[in-house]
Amino acid sequence: MMLEYDLFDMFAFPLYGLIIALLVVTIFVAPDVKGSHSWIVLGPIRLQPAEFAKFGTALMVSHVMSSYGFQLTQPRNFIKVLFIIFLPMICILLQQETGSALVYLAFFLMLYREGMSGYVLLSGVCAVVFFVIGMKYSGVTMGETPLGELLVALMLIGISLWLIWWERRDKDAVRWISIIAITAFVIAYIASFFFAVNFALVAIGILVVEAIILIVLSVRHWVWHYALIAFFAIVSMGFLFSVDYVFNNILEPHQQIRIKVSLGLEDDPSGAGYNVNQSKIAIGSGGLWGKGFLNGTQTKLKYVPEQETDFIFCTVGEEQGFVGATLVLILFATLIIRLFVLAERQDGTFGRVYGYSVASIFLFHLVINIGMVTGLTPVIGIPLPFFSYGGSSLLGFTILLFIFLRIDASRRQR
């Protein structure tokens, strides 16, 4: 808080370089802690560089994006920013610390505010939805029709039509594609009375015809939006067919079982699902008003593993009940909304980008941690800011937040 505002911008690059070096060193020298190599041990002191990489990356991204003449819409600049974000993310993944690495996806919310195409954000959301549908309905069929493929193809047809209308207001394209889709499904339905029909193939065929029409329109009118929508639809369908390969050949076994338990594909109450089950029991046992401070039986008797760190919220739910847990969420929501408001008020690009980065990181931690504790998201192991035990986490979040407070204070002083 006592440092000059300009120092954060001036030393962003050296600080980022130092943190990247620490992350690389950690990969080779860190001991194995529950399968993760993310802690540097210096005698009685244990540091987790991944927690400090968040504010270092946020400062570096802010420094680059506030440089003279920078425009995020230029491909070279966009790739440069992605490199800055993904470099620490890859280093952390090599430390087998998937949860901390995924936090860097929060920067895409800031990039969207700064001019990144909404297609990128839409693609990310769709990738998650399609992955879940592909896993949830893998092997589920209705006659000859794979349900997962049919659902995704129908969603892509609907999304494509919405994008055509939203971007170009092209009534003719929407009308003709809709007529083709309806006609194809009516013919397929009539044919199903005589022989088995794979409606998923029908939907995929419609999607291919739609893509061809959009490419023709793109060439005829020289409008890249049509081609981009076609590319999005085809790549998304291809992504769906790669879900099984990614799940079975890329993800680690413990990650696979966590995802299966979260999606209800497997029941493992004594294994991968134990933490979440005990956490939900603890939260539910708190009732409306809770059992009182330090009076939680589930947490006091250590039924919930990691209750001081990643699963700290279940302690709040059991001891303070629904009222206390809701109050905590309201306080977090107030903090995050306040950060977004202050970020928008900044009079320079550096402060605005850094502020949005901070707010996005806090939002990601809150949503994923609460979702993890309540069984809504897979267990990936990220702390709840200012609640979870851990010196590196507490110090990292404090520095992340107070750098922005110092930047905002300089705005008020000018």
Image: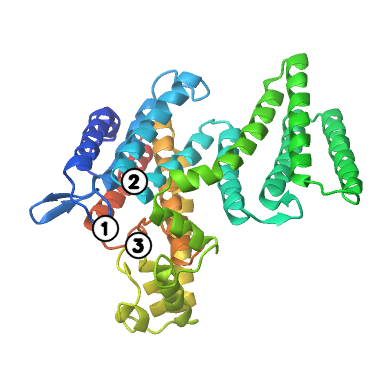
Q: Which sits earlier in the primary sequence, circle 2 or circle 3? A: 3
- Labelled disc at residue 34: 1
Rounded to the nearest angstrom, the CA distance separating label 2 from label 3 is 26 Å
Q: Is residue 142 above or below residue 191?
A: below
Badge nearest the viewer, 1 or 2: 1
Locate the C terminus by quadrant.
top left
Q: Position of residue 363 (x, y in %)?
A: 45, 52
Which residue position is annotated with label 3?
310
Q: Nearer the viewer, residue 150 or 296?
A: 150
Taking the image as shown, residue 123 lies to the left or right of residue 395, namely right
Which residue position is annotated with label 2?
405
Badge nearest the viewer, 2 or 3: 3
Taking the image as shown, residue 36 lies to the left or right of residue 84, namely left
For label 1, the SS is: loop
- Farthest residue in the front direction? 195
Rounded to the nearest angstrom, the CA distance separating label 1 from label 2 is 35 Å
Locate the N terminus by quadrant.
top left
Q: Nearer the viewer, residue 169 or 404?
A: 169
Taking the image as shown, residue 312 lies to the left or right of residue 24, namely right
Q: Residues within 10 Å of mark 3 (few under 14, many from 20)?
A: many
Q: Which sits earlier in the primary sequence, circle 1 or circle 3? A: 1
Q: Position of residue 239 (x, y in %)?
A: 58, 38
Mark 2 touches mark 3? (CB < 8 Å): no
- Number of numbered discs visible in the structure rendering: 3
Rounded to the nearest angstrom, the CA distance separating label 1 from label 3 is 14 Å
